Image: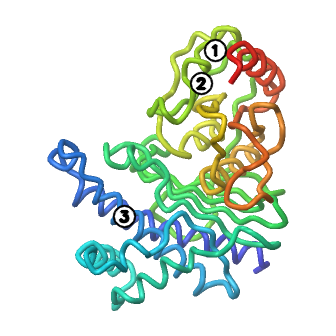
């Protein structure tokens, strides 16, 4: 087994294990009452448990693993949060038997590496927290970055429908130079079925993929862009990096994440895995100016503004319209 094969196998196992725990938390702890009270504790438990599991699995399988994660254990180490820490440890124990709270907190902090150097993983343990709380779409997103380039990505999408007749849950993998695949979320091994983007030559035939949460992207601009491109299909609205999966397998053809503030910069863990899945499926991902996403700037995409992902051949035309609409609104 090559090093890359070993990395892929470890990443798939880690994301599958974390996804199982997230599914359990969503089923057991998210209810109409928690939604009514806007209680975010279920997603907090799942978020920390997911990071602990992924970091532990990677460290056990791959020597010298460095992970840049979204979370750290500082909140859970507060004595006033002892009940929350215990709840996280209990959920981790569902997947990794015999653990104690101290171990779990240490595993979470394995995700505290600096986003620097030649090689590290980046993790969003739950991308799409509001989707998670609504019982809708969210993703466990893990990417491997080498010398500023994403070279391996795994997306666990527990509520995304797979092939007809299959249970909900799909796992998407991508290795630079090898293509992208979809696997059942429940299964064994890293091998799946190849996926590819839709082959379009006219943007007017495309379908937009947008966030459910309007605050995540400037949807007013998106509507103007759709109009100028001649798009009439209703947008496909889903949460999280599942949007990248939708582009990669042809559910939609354009994903816009338009800047909402001049000072905002995207986080690397919000895009690394999904970006590579789209590219390895034959699509194209840039920022709103058409520049490649630069993962060499630390924990944020500091040299980029927004994100545009498409099925490929229409990308340049989409970017030209994006630039025109942004110039008119002076954002």
Give percent across and percent down for residue 55.
54, 77
Report the residue at 47% width, 85% height from top: 106
Q: Is residue 202 above or below residue 100?
A: above
Give percent across and percent down for residue 147.
84, 66
- Distance from the alpha carbon under mark 1 to that under mark 3: 36 Å
Q: Is residue 21 above or below residue 89?
A: above
**Crowd tier of the residue under label 2, counting other residues whose Cα lies within 10 Å: few below 14, some 14–19, many 20 or above:** many
- Assign a secondary structure to mark 1: helix
Furthest residue toward front: 263
- What color scheme is it? rainbow
Residue corresponding to mark 1: 226
Report the residue at 70% width, 47% height from top: 275
Report the residue at 48% width, 46% height from top: 162
Report the residue at 63% width, 69% height from top: 68
Frontmost of labels 2 and 3 is 3
Image quadrant in which the C terminus is located: top right
Please report contact status of discs 1 and 3: CB closer than 8 Å, yes or no. no
- Mark 3 or mark 2, which is nearer the start of the sequence? 3
Q: Which mark is residue 150?
A: none
Please report contact status of discs 1 and 2: CB closer than 8 Å, yes or no. yes
Give percent across and percent down for residue 94.
32, 77
Q: Quadrant of residue 191?
A: bottom right
Residue corresponding to mark 3: 46
* Residue toward you, 177 or 285: 285
- Compared across the picture, whether 64 is left or right of 11 comes to right
Q: Quadrant of residue 314?
A: top right
- Distance from the alpha carbon under mark 2 to that under mark 3: 30 Å
- Assign a secondary structure to mark 3: helix
**Crowd tier of the residue under label 3, counting other residues whose Cα lies within 10 Å: few below 14, some 14–19, many 20 or above:** many
Residue corresponding to mark 2: 208
Give percent across and percent down for residue 231.
63, 12
* Residue toward you, 191 or 292: 292
């Amino acid at each position: 087994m090559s090093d890359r094969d070993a990395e892929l196998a470890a990443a798939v196992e880690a994301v599958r294990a974390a996804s199982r725990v997230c599914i359990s938390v969503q089923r057991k702890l998210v209810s109409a009452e928690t939604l009514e009270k806007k209680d975010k504790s279920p997603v907090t438990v799942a978020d920390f448990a997911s990071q602990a599991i992924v970091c532990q699995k990677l460290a056990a399988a791959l020597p010298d693993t460095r992970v840049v994660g979204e979370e750290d254990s500082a909140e859970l180490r507060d004595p006033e949060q002892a009940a929350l820490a215990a709840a996280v440890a209990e959920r981790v124990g569902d997947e990794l038997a015999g653990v104690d709270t101290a171990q779990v907190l240490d595993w979470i902090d394995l995700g505290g590496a600096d986003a620097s150097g030649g090689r590290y993983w980046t993790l969003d343990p739950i991308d799409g927290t509001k989707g998670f709380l609504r019982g809708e779409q969210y993703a466990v997103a893990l990417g491997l970055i080498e010398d500023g380039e994403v070279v391996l990505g795994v997306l666990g999408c527990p509520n995304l429908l797979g092939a007809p007749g299959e249970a909900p849950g799909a796992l998407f993998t991508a290795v630079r130079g090898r293509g992208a695949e979809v696997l059942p979320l429940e299964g064994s091994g890293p091998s799946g079925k190849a996926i590819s983007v839709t082959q379009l030559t006219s943007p007017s035939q495309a379908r937009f993929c947008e966030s459910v949460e309007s605050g995540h992207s400037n949807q007013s601009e998106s509507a103007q862009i759709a109009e100028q491109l001649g798009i009439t299909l209703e947008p496909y609205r889903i949460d999280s990096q599942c949007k990248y999966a939708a582009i990669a397998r042809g559910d939609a053809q354009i994903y816009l994440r338009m800047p909402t503030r001049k000072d905002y910069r995207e986080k690397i863990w919000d895009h690394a895995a999904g970006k590579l899945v789209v590219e390895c499926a034959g699509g194209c991902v840039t920022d709103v100016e058409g520049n490649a996403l630069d993962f060499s700037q630390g924990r944020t995409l500091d040299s980029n503004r927004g994100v545009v992902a498409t099925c490929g051949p229409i990308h340049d035309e989409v970017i030209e319209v994006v630039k025109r609409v942004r110039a008119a609104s002076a954002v």
